[in-house]
Image: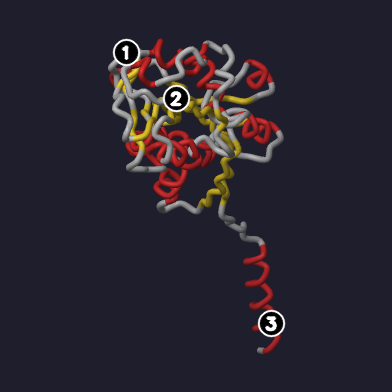
Amino acid sequence: MKQFWLYIILLNNLFFLNQPVIATETIHYGGATTLQKSYMPKASKAFKQGKDVKFRIQGGNTTPGMILLLKNRLDLGGGGRFLSEAEKRQGLVEIQVGWDALIPIVNTNNPITDLTFDQLKGIFKGDITNWKEVGGNDKTISLYIAPRKSGIRKAQQKLILANKPFSKKAFETPRVPSNAIKIIANKTGGIGVISKGLIASNPNNSVKTLTVNGVTPTPQTIQNKQYKLVKPLILATKGEAQGLVKDFIDFTLSEAGKEIMNESFFALE
């Protein structure tokens, strides 16, 4: 009898040893800081419901994220621009998931509520240096541009200056673009242009947004191209997306994902 039970135990052990181990899958995201802070936390939490999946979420900006994706150190890359042809040739695949608007911000004590595009361009070039030149108070303009290697800085230069140089008097925002909000909150003559997502995730009652040419960024003004200071938001994979990564991208494009996207950005129509 003792030998019989030993035989049964041995069979049970062999059975369980041969069963597949169902491990929790981890999706590792890196890239655009705007998506990292203003979309991925809520979206990943919603997506995980009922699924055996974990997320690792890091920033680092678009280009470094794409480099890590190419090195197979990420499962999913986020971008605030479209992929370059070189990145596509190396096997990266993009899916556009939304639009991000760049919006001028000033101190709430500044009476200005709107700038024309030409006025904004003049400020960024250094041709306009006092608020009285655009209908405001007699006060020196302090321009804050995003940090070097930031995707927002590249977008500022492309969308506002057509890739021409910034004003030599511009101040570089330290570390991350969102720090412009804290600075301008205490600088009545300050102005910056940053992501709607960063404004949404860093609320500050001492800062207000301006319209450009009288236009506020909305799904309609972006779709009909009335509001021009916009950049794409993408999710990228190395090769075609598969498995849970593809499921997450599909979720982002679903109505539930769009609802989260619209909290800080503009989902695709």
Label 3 residue SS: helix
Residue found 28% across the figure and 19% down from its top: 220
Q: Nearer the viewer, residue 220 or 10?
A: 220
Q: Nearer the viewer, residue 193 or 126?
A: 126
Image spot of residue 60 (x, y percent):
60, 38
Sequence-wise, which precedes: disc 1 or disc 2? 2
Q: Is residue 164 left or right of residue 222?
A: right
Q: Which residue is mark 3?
A: 6
Q: Quadrant of residue 64?
A: top right
Q: Which residue is mark 2?
A: 141
Q: Is residue 217 visible to us here?
A: no
What numbered label is drawn on residue 179? none
Label 1, label 2: how many angstroms apart (C-alpha)? 32 Å
Label 2 residue SS: loop
Amino acid identity at mark 1: Asn
For the N terminus, the image quarter is: bottom right
Image spot of residue 172 (x, y percent):
57, 31
Label 2, label 3: how many angstroms apart (C-alpha)? 85 Å
Sequence-wise, which precedes: disc 3 or disc 1? 3
